Amino acid sequence: MKVTKVTPMLIDKYMFVEVETDTGLTGLGESGAWGHLEASKTAAEKFGDYLVGKDPGPIEHHWNIMHRFGHFRGTAIVGAISAIDMALWDIKGQALGVPVHQLLGGPTRDKARVYGHVKAETPDEMVENCIKLKELGFTAIGHMNPFLDEDRDNAYFKPHARKIDDAVAVVARVREAVGPDVDLCIEIHRRLTPAEAVVFARELEPLRPMFYEDPIPPESYDAMARVADRIRIPLATGERFHSLHEFETLLVRNAVDYVRSSLCVCGGITGGRKIAALAEAHGVQLVPHNPLSPVCLFAGLHLDASIANFAIQEYPTVGVGFEDKGTSNAPTTTLAGKDIVTNVPAFKDGFVEIPQAPGLGVKLVKDAAEKFPPIPRRVRMRPHKDGSLVDQ
């Protein structure tokens, strides 16, 4: 078998790569270089020039060449490698007639627990949307920002006490509304300083969040370790990291309780399984990151099925946030990007089934690129009242 064509495609707000072979098999993967998908597409084209004419089978070999040939990397480049890696696993599974998780050692589970996304501009909306997810069967709610998803064009300012009090009150209201049978996955989007992160976490402790994600920017491993050492709720981070070595630096500092590896930026399935093994050696569980399309979800589910240290899978829902405005208040939601692909995994009672079809088990719909033109992510950040910038 030989690779005949590698095609990166900007579709809707996603970037996919299809790898075609001379046997008629085509593999599919996705890059998660959020905000830099155009650059990731260019990198995928370059790697495609290398792959054409080669056997797609030696995935680890190709993975090493793509990582090591040029010395310099980054999220846009490794996002392209991730997409191609997924596509190569997809081809191998199809060629052998087995789902990818069988190639990774076989399943440890037949379904994966997932958490849905919630967005809200006000505390009332946050409570209402969390109740909707519970009614739909979710046993965990994530992407939950206690500081709210306010309009980024509005300058932000609150004094320290008000800032902490208001955010704690949001979580307290949600906990009261959904009770102890729904886990809360608190997402801060790097909003706080280390000092603020410690103060806020201590206030959240009685509300028992499942984890506390990216309270500060993740670039300083020592700062994250300092926060982790001073709080008593589980800390989650890692969605921005694109190499095994970044995760190792984090883990040896005891700076994480749940690893948030993103298969679409950490080297695909090949990179993801290396990170999972590293986390397992440190007694840490995985919560795979996925704010992307169902293609990334399918890849994540195959890894989830094949490892022992899986905790919960991110499942990006729409219909419980800004998308609700002007529509019915009925508790309906769906998987983001579902119309772009041929099928989505079955969801029931907070779990989704592990895919059993050969390869990844998902394809793009016919003429997806024409039906869903690219939606570029423009460069913008929310201003603070003093003219500086706010992460949100």
Image (tube, rainbow, N blue to C red):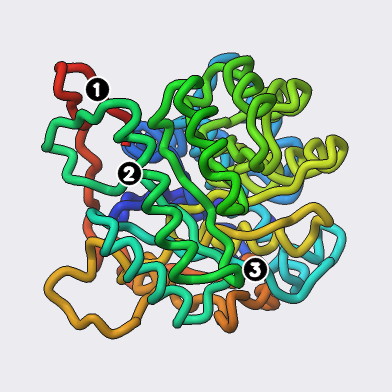
Res 139 quadrant in image:
bottom right
Q: Quadrant of the N terminus?
A: bottom right
Q: Nearer the viewer, residue 300 or 372?
A: 300
Specify whether 366 is left or right of 355: left
- Rendering coords of residue 38 (x, y %): 32, 37
Amino acid, disc 1: Leu
Residue 70 in view in this figure: no
Look at mark 2 in the image and give the residue it sits on: 166
Amino acid, disc 3: Arg
Name the element at disc 3. Answer: strand
- Decide which of tag 1 and tag 3 comes sooner along the chain: 3
Q: Residues within 10 Å of mark 3 (few under 14, many from 20)?
A: many
Q: Nearer the viewer, residue 179 or 109?
A: 179
Name the element at disc 1. Answer: strand
Q: Which label is found at residue 113?
A: 3
Query: Could you give the CA–CA distance between mark 1 and mark 2, rounded to whole angstroms?
Result: 20 Å
Query: Could you give the CA–CA distance between mark 1 and mark 3, rounded to whole angstroms?
Result: 36 Å
- Rendering coords of residue 352 (x, y %): 61, 75
Q: Residues within 10 Å of mark 1 (few under 14, many from 20)?
A: some
Q: Nearer the viewer, residue 86 or 388?
A: 388
Amino acid, disc 2: Asp
Specify whether 120 is left or right of 236: left
Look at mark 1 in the image and give the residue it sits on: 389
Residue lying at 53% horizontally and 44% vertically, measured from the top left:
204
Residue lying at 22% horizontally and 46% vertically, measured from the top left:
150
Name the element at disc 2. Answer: helix
Q: Nearer the viewer, mark 2 or mark 3?
A: 2
Q: Is residue 90 above or below residue 243?
A: below
Q: Nearer the viewer, residue 139 or 285?
A: 139
